[in-house]
Structures are given as C-alpha cells and as structure tokens.
Image (cartoon, helix red, strand yellow):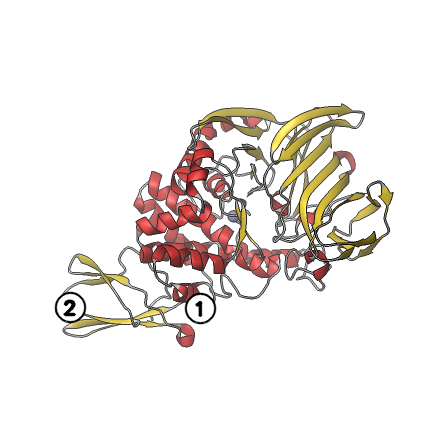
Amino acid sequence: MLHARATTLVAMLMAVGWHPARTQTDPRMSGGPLPPEQAAYDVRFYDLAVAVTPDDSSITGAIVVHADVVSPLEVMVLDLDTVFRVAETSLEGVGLRHERRGGQLWITLPRQYRVGERLAVRVAYAGKPRAVRRGGFDGFIWAETPDGLPWVTVSCEMFGADLWWPTKDHLSDEPDSMALHITAERPLVVATNGRLRSISESPAGRTFHWFVSTPINNYGVSLNIAPYVEVVEPYANVAGDTVPVTFWVLRHNAERARRALPEFLEHMRHLEDLVGPYPFWADKYGIAETPYLGMEHQTIIAYGANFRNDAMAGIDWGFDGLHQHELSHEWFGNQITPTGFQDLWLNEGFASYAQPLYAGSRLGRHKARELLTVYRSRVANRQAVAPRDVLTSHQAYTGDIYYKGALVLHSLRYLLGDEAFFTMLRRWTYPRPAAAEATGSCQCRLTSTDELVLHVNRFAGRRLDWFFEVYVRQAPLPRLRSRRSATELELTWDVPNGLPFPMPIDVRVGGVTRRVEMPDGSARIPVGEGVEVAIDPDGWVLRADER
Ligand SMILES: [Zn+2]
C-alpha cells in the first residue's frame, strides 16, 4: 500500500464522512474475524469480466468464483459493495436465489455441498463504484489525460476488493490463479495483473484478457485504463533470463518514463540480489502511471510519483522512493501475505526498511542513517505494531507499521549481525532457496508474526521471543537508563510491563566502540573520569528517548 501519512488517514476518512465500521457487513471494511459462512469455502480461481464506461462512471461485471468446500455448505457468502445492483446469481447456468445483507451477498445453493466438492458460482452485477474521495485512496478514479481522454484506475486495500467485484474479502484466502477480462472503448488500453493473453473486439470495445498464474491477494488486483503507450526496457534477471519490463505511461510522459526505467531496474537488481528473485517473472513486471500516488498491485505497480524523488511521505529519498517501496511489496505483501491486517507490518515494515537498505547500498551509509532518523521522528507508539487481536484494515493501519516496523527490523539486524540477518531475510522470502534461485518462481504463502518469530529463532539459533514481545506486541518502547560514576557506566533497560529485554548495545568509550551484552537487562562497564562516552553511536537500537 502506498506510503501515506498513515496516522492521519483514519482522521481524513472520518472527515469525509466515513466512520469505523459499525457492523461486519460494512463494505468499507476489510478483514477482521472471518465469518464461519466464509471459512466454509476456499477460493481456487476467480474469473472476472468487467466493462468500464467512463461516460457515466459505471461498470458492468460478472465473476465466476470457483471454490472448494471446506465444511458443509448451503449458502455461499460473498462481499460486494452496496452501490452495485446484482443482476443474477447462478450455478452451472441455473439461477440461484440471493439476498443482500449490507455489504454481503448470500447466495442459496441448490443443495448442501459436501466437504471436498468444488462449485463455481456466477454473479452478474452493475453500478457506479465508489469514487476516491479527497485525501483518500480507496475507490475508482475517473480522471482525464491532458488531451481529454479517460484515465481510469482503482485501488482498494483499506476497503477491500468488494469495492468493485464480488469476492471473499479476506486476506486469508487467495485464489491459485485469476483471469481478468477488462473491456474499454478504443483507443483506451487496459494494463492489469498477470500476462496479456489476447485482445478481442466487440461492439462494446476491446476486451483485454489477462491471466494471473500465481496466487494473488484481492486488494492486489487492479485495473489501469488510459490511452497508454508502452515503454519497454530489457532486464537481465538474477535467474539468468532477459525479460522485458513494461511501463504503461501517458504519451507526454514517455520520454521521462524511458529515462526513469534504468533506475527502476536498479531497484529490481538490488532487491533480487538482497532477498531473492522477483517472484512473478512467470507473469511479468510492469508499472502503470496512475493519477494517485502508488500501490503495490501485483505485477503492475501503480505509479503516480510523477518522477519525483520526494513524492512519497514528504521525504527526499535520494532516489525514486515510491517506486522502490511499491516494488519491494512484490516480495513483502504479494509473495508473502499476512492472514490478517493485524500483521500488516509484515508488508509495510519490511517494504519501508527496503528504502534505507537501498540507500545504504547505492548512496552510502550516511543516507540510510538520515532516512532512519526521519523514521524515528515519526514513531508514535500508540498501538502495538502487531497486536494479537484479529483486526480489520482500518483498525490495523497506523504509521507505526511502516516506520516503527522498519526500525524494529534495523534493531533485529544489529542483534543478529548482518550475515545471519540477511540469510534470515532471504529464507523468509524463499524457504526453498535452490528451486527459487534457479527458476525465479513464486513461493507465495500466507503467514503471520508468530511464524516470523519462529523463523528468526531458527536463524538466530536461540529464542528471541522477548525481542518481539517488547517491540511489536506492545505499544510503548523500552528505555535505556544510564548512570555514570567516577569509575563506571551503569546501563539498565527499563521495559514497560517489566518484560525481560536482554538487548545488547554499542558503547563508544574514548573513541573505541564495543558491544555491551546485557543478559539480565543491565551492565556495568569501567569508564575513567573525563573519558568521552557515547551510547549506541550508530543508532542501531530502537528505544525511547532518555529522560
Ligand atoms: Zn507500502
């Protein structure tokens, strides 16, 4: 998801008339506890057709949901925004009864389906999808190009994909693959997820048939429609293949796109070297110019930074931070997806740490340090980064899942050391490394913070649960108390709720930096009178300011 000033997002949404969900059937809510009716089936394949009519800002669509029955099923419950009219629901050509319950669509099946059976339910619908409201980024944007042609896009991470298509709106269920058939009038071009299989013509316009060959989270599905031109640059990937990378861009920006692509491919090179192959080479890597800032739509990053290095979060990254952030989500968020929004820091914390890592590699340590200092200034500590409760999107979304999440990873890197940390990171994205590095193929999976803790413990060779308990399971930060006497420096961790915190820290004494272990949360080191002392001079360890 884009790197908005997250802490203000909920306030902004509320200012435009949106309030935290009152019921589970609020279409503007995504995630939360999975209702038993939806836990009863597992989506295997979505086949979505949508015709887009910019003249009246409407869409007409049909979806076939192919699902396996997990527990006996008499009703299929999908989510769909209340703004749409449902024209028909059917199964194998036979009409089914349906009922709207707020943002849910209850479809009565002709009989009870048994565990293990597969069914394919079709829903035809139409209407005017919710448009993005000022300051927000969930909804359709019906924009125009400078020469007056339609420029239509959608993003929906917070509200969920039910904002524009009938779906099981929950992170815990991804289809194995998905087909998208998007229709728009000539000369409009449709750029979306996966690989373009064909283009067909009809009186309604041109239909672009795209196919996503891997699992995909439903908010990662998008469409970008404009009179795009394609700027293509070859890229030699880490798996040894030369592949085209395509930037769908408005004509007047084609030259700027061409100039930007070499740096974008450098972002790709850095991430492939660091954490493993781009996961979706089987489909493609593409970028689509959008009238909003950005979003990590799988294989088709939404790019609205307008070629400015400081477009994202008001920070001068020294490179195109927005592109690098969204690209990193292909590994952190798209390849690996948390099962619930309470673990969204696994997307945003990791994707936000990618910018200082890139800066450190390409621009020097001072730039990485500068970015981390900006992050530190934005940590709020109002809510745990990874609460144990099951949360909806808007309950989970805070600035801390970005900035604090990234700083937690930076502290973990200090604790583990570079070699163990980066090996851990590579195995987090690719648990079966040999296969991945040979083929560059997706090892898509669902995960959680608990799984990360087990994974880190394995690479550390010891239990580091205490680290995550303090940093991500509770809101307040630990504080390091220091006291100096004539002969020594005494250090003590002061941890909210009295949790154990044997975190080591660097101390520079008279120009020599050494790591001070604190197995019981405190340490004493001899320091002569008048000798200069600096605690954590390189800023590795996240902690509350000393008072
Ligand atoms: Zn993000």
Position in image of residue 404 (x %, y %): 44, 58
Give 302 or 196, whichever is nearer the viewer. 196
Instruction: Judge the density around disc 1: few (<14), some (14-19), many (≥20) Cα neighbours within 10 Å.
Output: some
Q: Secondary structure at mark 2?
A: loop
Query: Foreground: 432 or 537?
Result: 432
Quick check: 34 left or right of 491? right
Q: Secondary structure at mark 1?
A: loop
Dot 1 beta carbon under 8 Å from ligand 1 = no
Instruction: Classify 10 Å Cα crowding around label 2: few (below 14), some (14-19), many (20 and above).
Output: some
Give me the residue at 46% from left, 56% from top.
Answer: 452
Image position, residue 280 (x, y; %): 53, 36
Tag shown at residue 527: 2
Q: Residue at x 67, y 61 (%)?
A: 19
What count of labels does the image hold?
2
Report the amino acid beneath label 1: Pro
| Amino acid on which disc 2 is placed | Val
Would residue 217 be seen by someone viewing this image from the given angle?
Answer: yes
Up-down relation of residue 282 to residue 538 (above or below): above
Q: Position of residue 23 (x, y in %)?
A: 72, 63
Q: Residue 513, percent across and down?
A: 20, 57
